Amino acid sequence: MIASVRGEVLTRLGGEVVIEAGGIGYKLAVSSETLSSLPAAGEQTRLFTHLVLRDDAMHLYGFASQAERALFLMLIGVQSVGPKVALAVLSGGAPRELLNAIASGDTARFQAVPGIGKRTAERIIVELREKVAGKVSDEIVVRHTPTDDARTLAREGLLGLGFTPQEAEGLLDSAAGDTPEDLISEALKAAR
């Protein structure tokens, strides 16, 4: 199996990149997250890979990090989620954010991905929630019950915007307001 490819970026088009390594050009399908992290053509890079063999073709998928590749492998293990859909899911955010979405049962996040309906989104959450529980760090909050506390709701909103729990707490310490919206607005002003 090809575990990684290191070489010169030849082209970057759409969801594909060609990397020349040892005189061979490898065409890799990549997520938009990985594509955005790649250097310009002519520069050196390294991608972790996964090879999928089919009767009619071989497909090589590239990932900027081992965490992204691990999440890809978990996703393609879910019934009715193939490599293309898994890449579309990975294009929706950093692996850590997606793991948090799985752990918190955020089906709406997955339904927003083209090719994923309500049932597939629910299947992803049900099948991967236990696997993800060991990978989600203690600092990521898993929401179990709704609350009316403005600060808690504002914190969850900031986490949804991509702030770490520590950043969210720090921003809320300097924010004033009675509603979650006011607290988030003040916190975002302080973040600038």
Image (cartoon, rainbow, N blue to C red):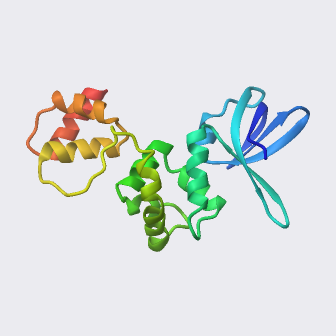
> Residue 134: x, y in percent?
43, 47
Please tell me in which quadrant of the rendered image residue 75 appears. Answer: bottom right
Residue at 61 percent of width and 46 percent of height = 69
| 174 left or right, relative to 34 | left
Residue at 35 percent of width and 43 percent of height = 161
| 178 left or right, relative to 139 | left
The one nearer the camera, 178 or 120, is 120
Location of the C terminus (image quadrant): top left
Q: How many marks?
A: 0
The one nearer the camera, 52 or 112, is 52
> Residue 98: x, y in percent?
46, 49
Q: Residue furthest right?
A: 23
Residue at 39 percent of width and 48 percent of height = 100
Residue at 47 percent of width and 54 percent of height = 131
The one nearer the camera, 128 or 106, is 128
| 166 left or right, relative to 111 | left
Q: Is residue 32 visible?
A: no
> Residue 47: x, y in percent?
69, 37
Please tell me in which quadrant of the rendered image residue 83 appears. Answer: bottom right
Q: Residue furthest left?
A: 178
Q: Is residue 87 above or below residue 174?
A: below
| 145 left or right, relative to 93 | left
> Residue 152: x, y in percent?
18, 45
Q: Is residue 13 visible?
A: yes
